[in-house]
Image (cartoon, rainbow, N blue to C red):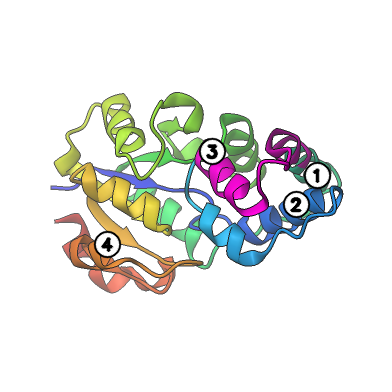
């Protein structure tokens, strides 16, 4: 029986991906580099270290990836400081509130850094719903490794068999499936791989579409 629901954050709860892309693009442009959307796609749902390897392969060893990451963070924080809007993904807030009101434990398992995760949860008014928040700062092996999900279950004191996960990225879904959790995928940027399609419990177009299956999801 499901007692716990664990959400990813970027691309699932919040429509942050377009904002991150523009920040990366601006940071790269300052060094005369063209940060393409295809490159951004390859970085979605993985750790900063893994993303840095993709970016380095794309631009070559002359690129200052550390500087680009730092500048991207500064541009993102400038955007937030200027009250730049971060929108919920369709049905995201309602889903969080629905499962909370059903009395289930809620956890968050994000590849983002703690600073931004906590800021966004607070800014969007849903921090109070989560009993546990696990980020890239809390693990040594990022998604698609299952560590972030296993650690979240451990923090919440539940077995993996009690956990229902919602993810949007291939790396995140792979991590949750590998952790042997019931995994539902809501793709945004990348479509599921064959492994994800074959092992996901359900695939939905948005979190608005989950309700007809609620009894099955929580059984």
Residue marked by disc 3? 127
Q: Please tell me how crowded label 3 is: few (under 14), some (14-19), or many (20+) other residues with Cα within 10 Å.
A: some
Q: Are marks 1 and 2 in contact (CB under 8 Å)?
A: yes
Q: Position of residue 136 (x, y in %)?
A: 48, 32
Q: Earlier in the sequence, mark 3 or mark 1?
A: 1
Tell me the magenta residue range. Answer: 48-71
The residue nearer to you, when weighing 87 against 41, is 41
* Secondary element at tag 2: helix
Q: Please tell me how crowded label 1 is: few (under 14), some (14-19), or many (20+) other residues with Cα within 10 Å.
A: some
Residue drawn at point x = 31 percent, y = 46 percent:
175
Please identify the quarter of the rendering in which residue 156 is found: top left
Residue marked by disc 1? 75
Q: Earlier in the sequence, mark 2 or mark 4?
A: 2
Residue marked by disc 2? 23
Q: Earlier in the sequence, mark 1 or mark 2?
A: 2
Q: Earlier in the sequence, mark 4 or mark 1?
A: 1
Residue marked by disc 4? 196
* Secondary element at tag 4: helix
Q: Are marks 2 and 4 in contact (CB under 8 Å)?
A: no
Horizontally, is 79 left or right of 216 in the view? right
Q: Position of residue 108 (x, y in %)?
A: 42, 40
Please identify the quarter of the rendering in which residue 178 is found: top left
């Amino acid at each position: 029986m499901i007692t716990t629901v664990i959400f990813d954050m970027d691309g699932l709860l919040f429509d942050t991906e377009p904002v991150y892309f523009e920040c990366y693009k601006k940071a790269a442009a300052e060094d005369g580099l063209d940060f393409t959307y295809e490159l951004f796609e390859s970085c979605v749902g993985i750790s900063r270290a893994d993303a840095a390897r993709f970016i380095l392969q794309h631009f070559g060893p002359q690129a200052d990836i550390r500087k680009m990451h730092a500048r991207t963070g500064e541009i993102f924080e400038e955007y937030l400081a200027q009250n730049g809007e971060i929108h919920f993904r369709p049905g995201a807030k309602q889903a969080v509130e629905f499962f909370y009101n059903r009395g289930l434990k809620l956890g968050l398992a994000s590849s983002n850094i703690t600073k931004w995760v906590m800021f966004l949860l607070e800014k969007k008014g849903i921090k109070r719903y989560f009993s546990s928040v696990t980020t890239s700062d809390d693990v040594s092996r990022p998604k698609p490794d299952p560590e972030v999900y296993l650690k979240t279950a451990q923090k919440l004191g539940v077995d993996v068999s009690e956990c229902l996960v919602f993810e949007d990225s291939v790396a995140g879904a792979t991590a949750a499936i590998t952790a042997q959790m019931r995994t539902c995928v809501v793709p945004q940027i990348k479509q599921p791989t064959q492994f994800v399609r074959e092992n996901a419990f359900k695939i939905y177009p948005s979190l608005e579409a989950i309700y007809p299956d609620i009894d099955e999801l929580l059984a």
